[in-house]
């Protein structure tokens, strides 16, 4: 049992440390976005090292976009000459748009967004001829990734490569026919599950709701209560706590509470996605942080005793606005918005139920032990501290640095025991 608790703690608190990088040195990228209503958007991502090879420059790794600006047009014209797109509808000319710089551990990448002409109707197959950089470096590789194609189940994708180009294979055909609404819907469910699992503030709010789920609280009762020991003497506990007797009713109760959380964030997620109501991001994130502390305080001194669903619902409304920013980051537009919202919310609910299924049996097992009140009280106090820390950072828009130091310390420990590779 202790082993699984340690694994759970590792997942909950260290998940943000593990971020996969799709980019690698000696490669350049084409990220393609396919929209059902018509239109193909894309962007080139070219490593600054490759720019040095092509134009004999000597840009350092920490080069700024301003320093690169005199060469941007040259790079764009070079790629326009070296990369061709065509289909049964004819040639698709590149029309450049925004330019940006992306800083990654293995180097900086110049980002050049563009539209493809004559793609009002999405072709079944897109022929790509990629010949860039090969004349300067025959070990170079061009990578094409479908970043967004809702009906193909590709949403915010940067890791699944579709085509690879080399000096010996400069031409290839990308099929755009393997798609269906079902694939997109299932992809949105996966996104919902993924984002509840990596959303540490959402997870801690759930944890605050789950912690008291295996006890019931009453004032001045004569019934046998949970042994409280030193915790009761400290003055923290003003209510009598009784361990639940049966697993099923208690489990269904916490499922009901979390379902009210889902109903609430579904309402505001829909309103925000439809642009009916939008709240300032700082306000939303600050309230989400505060919700953890208030839910945890409720565990020590009940605010709505027997009505935990009220807290879940009220703060779930703000968590929904937080999820809306996630959908915005995924680049979702109005296409299939109903299916996107439904799939994402189903995924969030599945993710939440998985967290409950993992934590609740452990709490039920220890509910009658003397250690449980300490876990509940001191665990809630820790959540309150974390909540106030995040609230101050978000409300004041400052970086208090403590979290960075903690993560650096934990990373060092994981690297020392071989659980994480050192950063190159």
Image: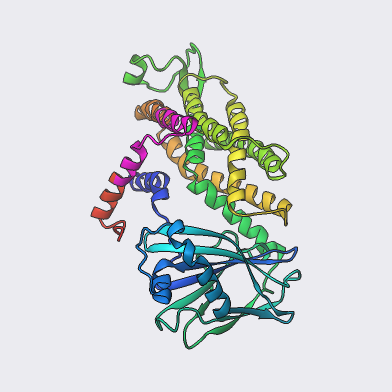
Residue 213 seen in this snapshot: no
Residue placed furthest toward the left = 416
Q: Which of 127 and 214 is in front in this view?
A: 127
User: Height in image: 354 above or below 239?
Assistant: below
Apparent side of residue 412 relative to residue 235 in the rendered image (left or right): left
Could you tell me how many numbered marks the image carries?
Answer: 0
List x then y, in percent, for residue 108: 41, 62
Q: Principal SS element in the magenta part?
A: helix
List x then y, in percent, for residue 135: 44, 84
Q: Which of 29 and 173 is in front in this view?
A: 29
User: Height in image: 214 above or below 222?
Assistant: below
User: Height in image: 147 above or below 79?
Assistant: above
- The magenta span reads 385-408
List x then y, in percent, for residue 75: 50, 71
Let me know if residue 206 is in the magenta part: no
Residue 178 seen in this snapshot: yes
Q: What residue is shown at x 32% (from left), y 41% (from top)?
A: 406
Residue placed furthest toward the bottom = 168
Q: Nearer the viewer, residue 389 or 119?
A: 119
Apparent side of residue 412 relative to residue 319 in the rendered image (left or right): left
Q: What residue is shown at x 63% (from left), y 39% (from top)?
A: 262
List x then y, in percent, for residue 144: 54, 73
Q: What residue is shown at x 44% (from left), y 29% (from top)?
A: 392
For residue 185, which quarter of the picture? bottom right
């Amino acid at each position: 049992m202790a082993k699984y608790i340690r694994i759970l703690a590792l997942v909950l608190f260290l998940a943000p440390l593990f971020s996969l990088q799709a980019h690698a040195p000696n490669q350049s990228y084409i990220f393609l976005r396919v929209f059902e209503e018509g239109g193909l958007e894309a962007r080139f991502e070219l490593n600054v090292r490759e720019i040095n090879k092509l134009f004999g420059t000597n840009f350092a790794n920490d080069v700024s976009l301003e320093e690169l600006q005199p060469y941007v047009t040259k790079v764009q014209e070079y790629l326009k000459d070296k990369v061709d797109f065509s289909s049964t509808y004819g040639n698709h000319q590149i029309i450049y748009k925004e330019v940006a710089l992306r800083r990654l551990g293995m180097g900086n990448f110049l980002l050049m967004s563009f539209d493809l002409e004559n793609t009002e109707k999405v072709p079944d197959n897109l022929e790509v001829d990629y010949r860039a950089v090969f004349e300067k470096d025959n070990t170079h590789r061009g990578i094409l990734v479908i970043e967004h194609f809702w009906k193909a189940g590709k949403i915010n994708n940067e890791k699944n490569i579709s085509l690879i180009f080399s000096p010996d294979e400069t031409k290839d055909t990308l099929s755009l026919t393997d798609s269906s609404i079902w694939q997109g819907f299932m992809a949105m469910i996966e996104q919902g599950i993924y984002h509840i699992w990596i959303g540490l503030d959402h997870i801690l709010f759930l944890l605050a709701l789950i912690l008291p789920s295996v006890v019931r609280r009453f004032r001045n009762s004569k019934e046998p209560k949970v042994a409280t020991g030193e915790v009761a003497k400290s003055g923290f506990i003003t209510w009598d706590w009784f361990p639940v007797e049966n697993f099923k009713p208690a489990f269904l109760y916490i499922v009901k509470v979390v379902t009210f959380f889902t109903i609430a964030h579904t309402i505001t997620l829909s309103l925000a996605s439809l642009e009916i109501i939008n709240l300032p991001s700082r306000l939303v994130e600050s309230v989400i942080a505060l919700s953890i502390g208030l839910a945890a305080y409720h565990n020590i001194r009940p605010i709505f005793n027997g009505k935990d669903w009220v807290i879940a619902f009220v703060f779930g409304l703000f968590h929904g606005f937080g999820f809306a920013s996630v959908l915005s980051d995924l680049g979702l537009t109005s296409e299939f918005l109903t299916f996107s919202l439904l799939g994402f919310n189903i995924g969030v609910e599945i993710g939440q139920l998985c967290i409950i299924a993992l934590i609740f049996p452990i709490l039920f097992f220890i509910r009658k032990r003397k250690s449980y009140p300490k876990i509940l009280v001191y665990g809630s106090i820790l959540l309150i501290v974390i909540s106030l820390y995040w609230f101050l950072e978000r409300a004041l828009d400052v970086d208090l640095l403590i979290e960075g130091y903690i993560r650096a310390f934990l990373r060092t420990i994981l690297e020392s025991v071989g659980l994480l590779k050192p950063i190159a």
